[in-house]
Amino acid sequence: MGGTIQGHFDNHLNLRKIILEKRPEILVECGAGKGDCTRLIARMKNIYPFEFHVVSDNKIEGIDAIWHEGLSYEALKEFKEESLGMVIIDTDHNYWTLRQELAVAAPKMKEGGLLIFHDVEEFYHNSGLSMGYWNGQSYPQQEILSMTQLGGTGMALIDFLHEQRGFFKLVRWIPEHYGAAVVERKTVTQTFVVMPGTKPVFAPIVEPLKEEVLC
């Protein structure tokens, strides 16, 4: 499997800087691993107050966070719609799992909220398979294997962006340290046609003319 997202905390993606710039009121981390990045995020509560939730197969003691022991795509259902300012996803690296997570997370994101992903390069085409959950819950091995031809986390994210065009925007993708990506909840309310020339004119798209009924 890929490396921990801790490698992006102060380097590469610079998760710390993103958090400080965005200052989400509610931040959720899905996939704590051994808790290396989780501890660093929790310490940032000393800089500004925020609600920190961690979804993981098992609770790690000594970290100031609200723990949800279980599966990411089930635990995310507990949050209210349009309530989350940031969700970090570093879980099972396969197409099926990420699509489950995104289907639940998408309506939970606030406008301007960020989804942050790890291992999008390492598992762009290749699919990661854990073969089981630590807490004993049933592992959907057949569902995961049936979608391996669609790729891994990278391809799952790209397909999500295609389907959610006009609502989510890719704002950053870097290949370093197994790859990481940032997606913003950004609803498009108006599009423009850019006219050619030295001084482009931005012209609003005209609505289709309604057919007139002839008497």
Image (cartoon, helix red, strand yellow):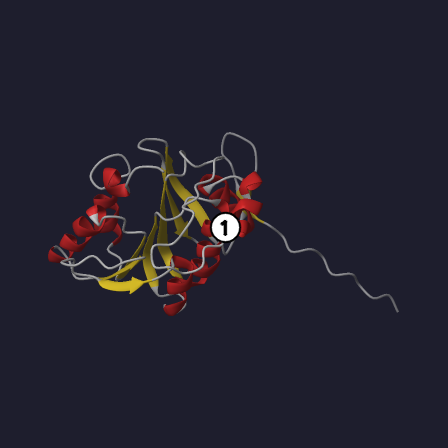
Observer-nearest of 56 and 42: 56
Question: Which residue in the rendered view is the most extreme toward the left?
Answer: 46
At 24% from the left edge and 55% from the top edge, which residue is drawn? 23
> To which residue does mark 1 refer?
141
At 50% from the left edge and 56% from the top edge, which residue is drawn? 189
Observer-nearest of 102 and 189: 102
Picture coordinates of residue 10 (x, y %)?
20, 39
Q: Using the rendered image of the protein, determine whether residue 14 is visible from the camera's viewpoint.
A: no
Q: Using the rendered image of the protein, determine whether residue 17 is visible from the camera's viewpoint.
A: yes
Relative to 104, say whether 32 is above or below.
Answer: above
Observer-nearest of 185 and 39: 39
Q: Quadrant of the N terminus?
A: top left
Residue type at mark 1 is Gln
Question: Which residue in the rendered view is the most extreme toward the right?
Answer: 215
Question: Which residue in the rendered view is the most extreme toward the front?
Answer: 136
Picture coordinates of residue 13 (x, y %)?
28, 38
Relative to 87, say whether 147 is above or below.
Answer: above
Relative to 190, say whether 117 is above or below.
Answer: above
Relative to 202, is 46 on the left or the right?
Answer: left
Picture coordinates of residue 177 (x, y %)?
31, 32
Q: Quadrant of the C terminus?
A: bottom right
